[in-house]
Image (spheres, rainbow, N blue to C red):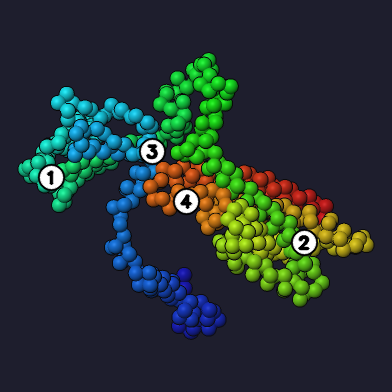
Amino acid sequence: MAALTVNEISVIEERHPQIFHRPAYKRFWPLFLIAGTLLYLAYALWFFSLPQVLKESHWERLPLFLSQWISYDLQPEFRLDQPQITPKYPRFSALGENPNPDWVIRNPDGSFTVRIDGEAKSVTFDKTRATIVANGQTVPVSLTGGKPLVEGPVPDWVTVHDDEVVARMGFVGEVRVTVDRVKVRKRFLGWANFVFDTRSPFFGKSASEVFSLIVAGPELQPGTSNLALAADNIWNNAQWQHGDVWTKLLQTIVMAFLGTLLGGIVAFPLAFFAARNITPSGLLSQVLKRFFDFMRSVDMLIWALFFTRAFGPGPLAGSAAIFFTEIGTLGKTYSEALENIDDKPREGVLSTGANGLLVQRYGVLPEVVPIFISQTLYQWESNTRGATIIGAVGAGGIGLKLWEAMRTNSNWANVFYMVLLTLFVVFVFDNISNFLRRRLSRTLHDYNRLQAAQG
């Protein structure tokens, strides 16, 4: 292969300057992009004070919150300043009235033993002394002085305060000892009383016992079948409020459907007047497009805040917020779909002498309706998620219920229950929407092939 001379190389360079003499920004754009990204990340670290936020965050609370999503605790308290030591449970204990759990043991000498994790973690106490066992260690605590006194070395899982000794035993619970009381927190996996609450006659019975009572047992409430009674007890469970939660979930679904449907109905005719290739007035097209921009630029959450002030809290405010937002979103997507249609079918219908309405009916609608429906289905799916968020500001639905449960900061199992329900509904509607969009996409593809064959 012959080598090129210097003159030949110069001629080639002059002939193709875009290759051999590219501007600096074209040659070094990857380096500029990397440098810009690093500068932006550094700016974000400074602007949001991320190092300080990460340092001051209470990461130790995360395992506690997560554990409360999937577990519950029982907290018996034993007063040592009474004539006789007796366990006292919170008013709304998951054990119901007159609890007598097998892990609280009254010893023959009058002392008590509470097994927090079998015999491996427990506390035994009377009015003068408490013995805490955990992690293979035994910690005796004297209660005869003015404050509890740990006898011997203090392990790292025991914290001694001025008037209290706290023994943290991990996920299973903890023990708090003072001179006048012992308080135990014992944690269990699962959701307590999820099916029947403590008021139900089915409470505390095994699944086989409940089934036997429903099938062939005597009526627990005269005049009402056991099946109807069981269904009523589940629906009106005071602790989990299944009836109210499912009703609010249905409200969320209806809000999303109604708001999307009404938004699509209003946006449909307006989109024809906004499309440049269909409306005869350029001014009207611009006015409507700016109207769509305004309607969708105001976030759904802001609309929800506005309508809760106008109509009061409830699903009407949520439906109106979705409706107003969807007028802008669907109006924009519909008009853009109209502006990108193939003009040949419309010109063919127009050549027959048809009026403007018939031209749109037979020359435009067959091409855009599948796209309109696909876009509307996607928005409906998205609004099912959005309706949960706007419910938190008073717009009804399960979002309001979820926010109420979170505000107590002690009902995280109920929060997780509602989160799982919301995820399930979104998953179902996502799959339904995807299925319908695939079917519509195939319909549109077949229509285009038919049009091409006829053209």
Of the residues tagged 4 and 1, which is closer to the observer?
A: 1
Q: Check disc 2 and give the amino acid type.
A: Pro
Camera sees residue 310: yes
Answer whether labels 1 and 2 touch (C-beta < 8 Å). no
User: Foreground residue, 188 or 268?
Assistant: 188
Q: Secondary structure at mark 3?
A: loop
Residue 158: x and y in percent read 16, 45
Residue on which disc 4 sits? 404
- The crowding category of the residue bearing disc 3, from other C-alpha atoms within 10 Å (few below 14, some 14 to 19, many at least 20), is few
Residue on which disc 1 sits? 148
Distance between mark 3 and mark 2 Cα atoms: 57 Å
Q: Residue at x 11, y 47 (%)?
A: 146
Residue on which disc 3 sits? 92
Q: Secondary structure at mark 4?
A: helix
Q: Identify the mark nearer the N-term, 3 or 2.
A: 3
Residue on which disc 2 sits? 269
Q: Check disc 1 and give the amino acid type.
A: Pro
Distance between mark 1 and mark 2 Cα atoms: 78 Å
Answer whether labels 4 and 1 touch (C-beta < 8 Å). no
Residue 387: x and y in percent read 57, 53
User: Foreground residue, 355 or 221?
Assistant: 221
Answer whether labels 4 and 3 touch (C-beta < 8 Å). no
Image check: 392 left or right of 144?
A: right
Of the residues tagged 2 and 4, which is closer to the observer?
A: 4
Residue 182: x and y in percent read 21, 40
Residue 57 sits above or below residue 25 on the image = above
